[in-house]
Structures are given as C-alpha cells and as structure tokens.
Image (cartoon, helix red, strand yellow):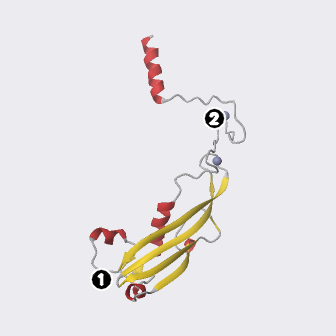
Amino acid sequence: MNLTEVFQQEGKRISLSIPLDEQIKFEKKWKDTPLITLKFSNLEKGKVLMEGKGEVQFFAACDRCLADKVETVSLDFERELFSPDISIDEDTREEQYYLNGYDLEIPLLLQEVLHMYWPTKILCKEDCKGICKKCGQDLNVAACQCDDFVPDVRFANLMDLFNNSK
Ligand SMILES: [Zn+2]
Ligand SMILES: [Zn+2]
C-alpha cells in the first residue's frame, strides 16, 4: 500500500478496512471475516500516525481439555511512521521494517501485530482442569480414580537419599 500522499499532504487522513485472511496465511479457521481497521494521519511532512484496531475470532481447541472454542483476539496498536526522506536514527528505521520506501507491507505489519497480541494459552475457561493423562477422563466433567501423584523431582531426590541411607 502506497503512503506517499499521506506522508506529503498536511492534514491528510486515510482509513481502510483490511480482511486479514487475504493478507496472511493461518493454519486455523477464522470465524467470520477477520477485519483490521487501519487509519493513517499526517502529523507533519514525512511523519504519519498509524492506528490499527480489530477484533478477530478463530476456531480453536482448549490447550488442556481439547474442547472446541472460539478464541477472540483484540488488536489495538499505534505506530509512528517516517518517510524515507526524513532522517531518523538507525533503530527507528529498523523497527519499521514493514515500511519499504513509501510502501507499507501490510502482511509484514499484520504478522508482527498478531504475534504481539497472540494468546500464550488457549483455555475453555480460566480454571479448566484438563484431561487425566492416564485414563483420558475429562476432569471438568468428573474426577477419575487414577493416582495422579507425580513426585516432585526435588522430592524424589530426597527420597533416594533416604532409601540409600538405609
Ligand atoms: Zn478446557
Ligand atoms: Zn484418570
């Protein structure tokens, strides 16, 4: 997407809605069309404020019990962009690597933003009890009879110590 106009025209604003699924590949299935709104506002010549917002949903499984769920990720970000003819320090230039000359590489930007907001854990509910590793019982539904005592490694070492001293 070419940003020459918004970089050069004072007071210029552009707003657009971008379907995420047309920009990046995703191994899971989106629920509805994931839309991101991008707004560009000229702050001064060569300097643009970019604001992005969106709420995207996709089908996923709980990390603990594998139950199906729809996960929602809310995106809300703001960046200042500097045109190539403005002198800025090296670090700032590198940070906006998704800006190639006057062209915004939307897929690169979106990948970074998604990465930033991606949930570290997907859970059906905060306190999901998961599945018993021995019998496969969904522990949210009922407890099982398995002995779920897993000795702590430090504790196990201590036990060895005692056993050896006998
Ligand atoms: Zn779960
Ligand atoms: Zn069990």
Q: Amino acid at mark 2?
A: Lys
* The quadrant where residue 8 appears: bottom left
Quarter of the rendered image showing ligand 2: top right
56 on left or right of 137: left
On screen, residue 140 above or below 158 = below
Q: Nearer the viewer, mark 2 or mark 1?
A: 1
Name the residue at the right extreme: 141
Any atom of ligand 2 within 8 Å of the CB at mark 2? yes
Q: Quadrant of the C terminus?
A: top left
47 on left or right of 19: left
Whether residue 105 is visible: no
Question: As rendered, which of 54 and 32 lies closer to the eye?
Answer: 54
Residue position for label 1: 85
Q: Amino acid at mark 1?
A: Asp
Image spot of residue 56 (x, y percent) = 59, 66
* The quadrant where residue 93 appears: bottom left
Determine the residue positioned at 50% across, 64% down: 114
Name the residue at the top extreme: 166
| Label 2–label 1 contact, CB within 8 A | no
Determine the residue positioned at 52% across, 81% down: 15
Residue position for label 2: 134
> The residue tagged with tag 2: helix, strand or loop?
loop
Determine the residue positioned at 66% across, 56% down: 69
- In this figure, what is the number of numbered marks? 2
Determine the residue positioned at 45% across, 76% down: 50
> The residue tagged with tag 1: helix, strand or loop?
loop
